[in-house]
Amino acid sequence: MPLTKQRPSVVGLAWADAYAAARDLPTALPPETVPVEDSRGRTLAEPVRAVTPVPAFDSAAMDGYAVAGPGPWTVVGLVLAGPMDRAGREAGSHSMSDKSGIEAVPVAATAHPGARPDTAKATPHPGARPGTTEAAHPGAGPDAADAAAPLVTSAASAVRLRPGTAAEIATGAPVPGNADAVLPYEDCHVGGGVVHGARGPRSHIRRAGDDVRARAVIVPAGETMTATRVAAAVQAGVEHVRVRRRPTVTLLVTGDEVVLGGRPGPGQVRDSFTGIVDAVTARAGGVLHAVRHVRDHPAELAAALDTAGADVVVVSGSSSAGAADHLHALLDERDADWHVRGVACRPGHPQGLAARPGGRWVVSLPGNPYAGLVSVLTLLEPLLNALAGRPPVTLPAVPVSGAAKLVPGAVRIVPVRDGMLLPPGGSAGLAAVAAADALAVLPDHWRDGDPAPRLELP
Ligand SMILES: Nc1nc2c(c(=O)[nH]1)N[C@H]1C(S)=C(S)[C@@H](COP(=O)(O)OP(=O)(O)OC[C@H]3O[C@@H](n4cnc5c(N)ncnc54)[C@H](O)[C@@H]3O)O[C@H]1N2
Ligand code: MOO
């Protein structure tokens, strides 16, 4: 850069105003519908509502016996977890006779091995209290498999137990209609096909809709989907969600001296920005579509700007006043609307944010790597958050300790670790910030121990 030009001074928009402009000016991209399984990291344009209640049906919370009326209870069958029509479809079905204690029930023609407690071997259930169980639960022995058909079904929602009867039941299986409770194996004992025990204070029945009612909001609009939220939505029968379109980013890496890969030769430097822009773009809900190297020639940069075809074009280098810095002139020629053109901060003051006609954005990063990182966090991240439809972020103010050389009329942005200032590096190096867990934005009135806005490092 020509040495005759004026020395750079820290002038420009206040840092907090620059951050707020990037965060508040853009409007969210339009919504689209995607399968819920693909929605992780996407921002909701509409709330996710339960399609089905959770649980979807009354189900057993414990392995044991579903009982109806006062005890003791004669065991009349076995209810397993599974598709509601599984037993009938797989094994053929018929109605249980009135003697069974169960009314109008489609049941399987073949018994589950060991389903009848009175034919089961006298082996205690592993979880049962010692001495309380004299007969076994399902799977007790092959002799039982040959026995006459008992109720073996998962269609228990259609099943109604008569008072004084019980159905052995698995956790998660649908509870027969008018069952009052499930007695866990541990709280009862079985002899001669009869369950003895007393109901405790809890029914051990999960009622349909206990967790979530149909149509209830599971995740509100504006929230970002996570793996946990996807799982909650899937559990409630959700198949598709309305999310904001992801903002797309193209990174134009300018500079004849910059190489995108390999070991730099004499006079060359290795690009520092691709990984940082990729990580922050993903964190903000966007997607880095393309990275292009652009030589220091105005026509080449002009062509790259005009063909980028992304919602946001990030240009590294070319932010300043040097003979090879063409970005500002090119954007002025293209009627760009500069919202930020220089920020009162150190490092990173030459950064900028412009809107091009047609709703596309340009973020200008200073070429010095630490300065560029500051600008990624000051302008690019809040811009992408807003385009992705995320709610505006108020940066946390976290106490910072140590000594810093403050900048009158501007902020100094410094690496911190566990709230302690680290020895500062220059604006061109990244080693100092590599030791940090965040950046602190120190105003010129900051004092040791004062809180300062915290920028999370990618
Ligand atoms: N006369 C003035 N000179 C400078 C000013 C000023 O206001 N007046 N500002 C200084 C500040 S502050 C910064 S920051 C830089 C900004 O420079 P540019 O954005 O124009 O970038 P370049 O001049 O192309 O490069 C600066 C420096 O960064 C290296 N660089 C560039 N791209 C990359 C990359 N992708 N990866 C790693 N390093 C990169 C480049 O090699 C240079 O060393 O201007 C000051 N000068
Ligand atoms: O601000 Mo420059 O961004 O000092 O290196």
Image (spheres, grey):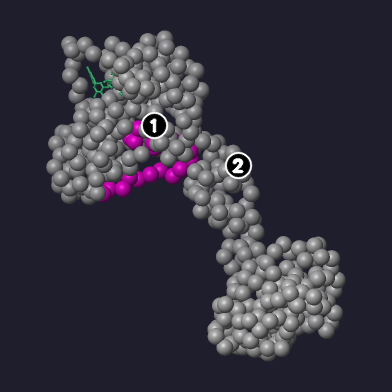
As drawn, is 130 to the left or to the right of 330? right
Residue range in magenta is 376-398
2 or 1: tag closer to the N-terminus: 2
Viewer-nearest of labels 2 and 1?
1
- Mark 2 closeness class: few <14, some 14–19, many ≥20 residues within 10 Å: some
Q: Is residue 351 visible?
A: no
Quarter occupied by residue 284: top left
The residue at 23%/48% (across/down) is 419
Q: Are marks 2 and 1 in contact (CB under 8 Å)?
A: no
Nearer to the camera, 392 or 404: 404
Tell me the SS state at disc 1. helix
Q: Position of residue 147 (x, y in %)?
A: 80, 78
Distance in Å between CA atoms under marks 2 and 1: 27 Å
Kindly tell me whether mark 2's CB lies below 8 Å from ligand 1.
no
As drawn, is 294 to the left or to the right of 165? left
The residue at 17%/34% (across/down) is 407
- Residue 275's label in the rendered image is 1
Nearer to the camera, 226 or 121: 121
Q: Position of residue 285 (x, y in %)?
A: 47, 39
Quadrant occupied by the N terminus? top left
Q: Name which residue type carries label 1.
A: Gly
- Residue 34's label in the rendered image is 2
